[in-house]
Image: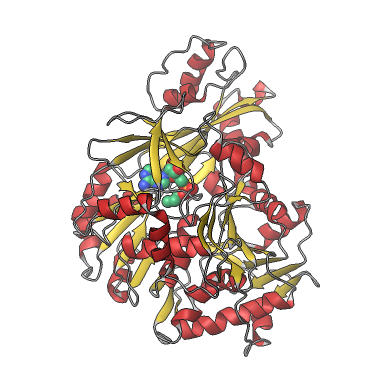
Amino acid sequence: MDYDALYRRSIDEPEAFWREQAARIDWHQPFEQVCDHSQPPFARWFAGGLTNLCHNAVDRHVPQRPDQPALVYISTETGQERSLSYGQLYVEVQRTAAILQAMGVRKGDRVLIYMPMIPEAVVAMLATVRLGAIHSVVFGGFASHALASRIDDAQPTVVFTADAGSRGGKVIAYKPLLDEALKQAQHAVPHVVVVDRGLAPAPLQAGRDHDFHTLRREVMDAQVPCEWVASEHPSYTLYTSGTTGKPKGVQRDTGGYAVALAMSMDLIYCGQPGETFFCTSDIGWVVGHSYIVYGPLLAGMTTIVYEGLPVRPDAAVWWSIVERHRANVMFSAPTAIRVLKKQDPDCLKRHDLSSLKHLFLAGEPLDEPTARWIGEAIGKPIIDNYWQTETGWPILSLARGVDPHQAPRLGSPGVPMPGYKVTLRDDQTGEPLTGANQKGVLTIDGPLPPGCLQTVWGDDRRFVQTYWSTFPNQPVYNTFDWGIRDEDGYYFILGRTDDVINVAGHRLGTREIEEAVSSHPAVAEVAVVGVADEVKGQVARAFVVVKDPQRVADDAGRAALEAEIMRTVDGQLGAVARPARVHFVNVLPKTRSGKLLRRAIQAVCEGRATGDLTTIEDPAALQQLQEAVAR
Ligand code: PRX
């Protein structure tokens, strides 16, 4: 079959197509309906079916491949390397499930996971869905305030954490950040489980905090069967940024997600049972959920869980892992490749990469020079893929699993994947743009295919309003990305239409950063914009109006306050969100109606023309901005 036939069938005969795909996973009870779309935009995939994500990722493989490694953990931070076979993972997951169960975790309850990249984090995710509970992983790089708001939204019964993570050899204590978040949160978390790695011993609060290793020793023989849940039962929520400051809990189902991931492993990533998948993301992001944890395990593959940087001890570290573990598929982000590009090119030539079939990259635009450079350096096809936390798996990519000769096109993440009815639309009218090479907003007609978000956790209205209400009378899903399609149907992504920025593949909301900056007592007003950066793709820059201009009257004052504001952001959201620069101005450029001219600020920072600014309130504001940037 070729790509066109595959895609056409998914659109023209969705029932038959998805019924076939659903056979890739085990169902405890068969579904009655492929898709219930009777209440759009809500879609219930495989309605009436009962299944379990942990069963499909772990239990199902134990008879066939008990001794095959399911998970290989490699830490260049602690020097540890540990492997868990499917048989061992099955046992470990039941132990952790027993621990959660003893704390009262039942079907539908939430378990928040705030963990570094260690096997216990993956086990905790699997144990949670085993019980029919719902996990919410919060990226370990987020700090107390960000964590507290997620705790309040998810209202977990248990928080799973570790004493510390490590980054670039520097220990980052997690437990104190969690303690602070628990103080800030309204929701009282009954139980905290701490995996003590011996990195930053933390005191345990009696009654609330528990030592994981102690608990585990008490449940060594635990047998905890999978809870069979309805296909549409939520498996997890994952918070992501949008236009407003409050992060949204993207809610994913169980059956649709399992089917979509199993399909994507075969058709997109060309990953087969028994092979090894190496994804360099973090479990705190959607790429980690789908392609460190669930995708590879659903496919019966070995997944590599890597804790460390791409350039430590040297820039060959990933490729030595590929060589030693005979990795067949690799998945990373363009930023990491741009970091490697700055290192000794011979690092890439030192290792035998013959096992590797493809390198997939996603999360941010893949520029042509980077794609070309890495393709030549490793001599493998580089496959871009475009998607979002909301969709859980690629919207655009190539389907090399059915069409091995489908050619990548430099600068393009490819063509629509099965089930995605992608349309570019006029940003004002919402009318579809049918011609080639027209720039429009990338939208998807409902129902979204299996695996995509079901709703926003606890807020159906927000789901409908945020994603489905951009164009009156045209209820289509808005990705908030600009796109363009060439004559051959390849798409190109041209950046976000909203205030979301992408820093080193990490999705951040400028409003969230603005709120953190504003919490500094010296700040009267702030604007945060994303500015193009050679390595990170984009970085955040903050423009601040201070309450007392005396504080920023000279270089020393400015430098001191800049550092203080950065520390404030670090403490609230985490270093991932820290602006690269904080500039001080007397006034921010706004329209006469008081709207911040973000695009103009961004243009000034990038040295571009600001475009038509007839509506600007105070033209001197831009002049001042230019001076501040030049300083
Ligand atoms: O703007 C697009 C960009 O990242 C956003 C989604 O980020 P996140 O929710 O973190 O999910 C990442 C999943 C891979 C998108 O709205 N983006 C993602 N992939 C690409 C991309 N931009 C250009 N090319 C890509 N391949």
Q: Which of the pair 570/218 is nearer the observer? A: 218
| Residue at 45% in and 64% down | 259
Position of 362 with respect to 135 (left or right) is left
Residue situated in front as seen by the camera: 2 or 369: 2
- In the image: residue 618, left or right of residue 505: right
Q: Quadrant of residue 221?
A: bottom right
Residue 59 vs residue 132: left or right? Answer: left
* Image location of residue 502, percent across then percent down: 46, 42
Q: Is residue 276 above or below residue 231?
A: below
Name the residue at 56% across, 81% down.
92
| Residue drawn at x 56%, y 34% as measured from the top left | 469
For residue 85, say whether it is visible.
no
Residue 564, image quadrant: top right
Give the total number of marks visible in the rendering: 0
Q: Residue 297 in the image: x percent, y percent? A: 44, 72
Check the image and name the residue furthest to the bottom: 221
Quadrant of the rendered structure where residue 263 is? bottom left
Is 203 above or below relative to 12?
below
Q: Can residue 519 be seen in the rendering of this structure?
A: yes
Q: In x, y percent, where is residue 488? A: 22, 40
Quarter containing the N terminus: bottom left
Q: Residue at x 46, y 76 (%)?
A: 80
Find residue 300 and report its horizontal and vertical position in percent: 40, 75
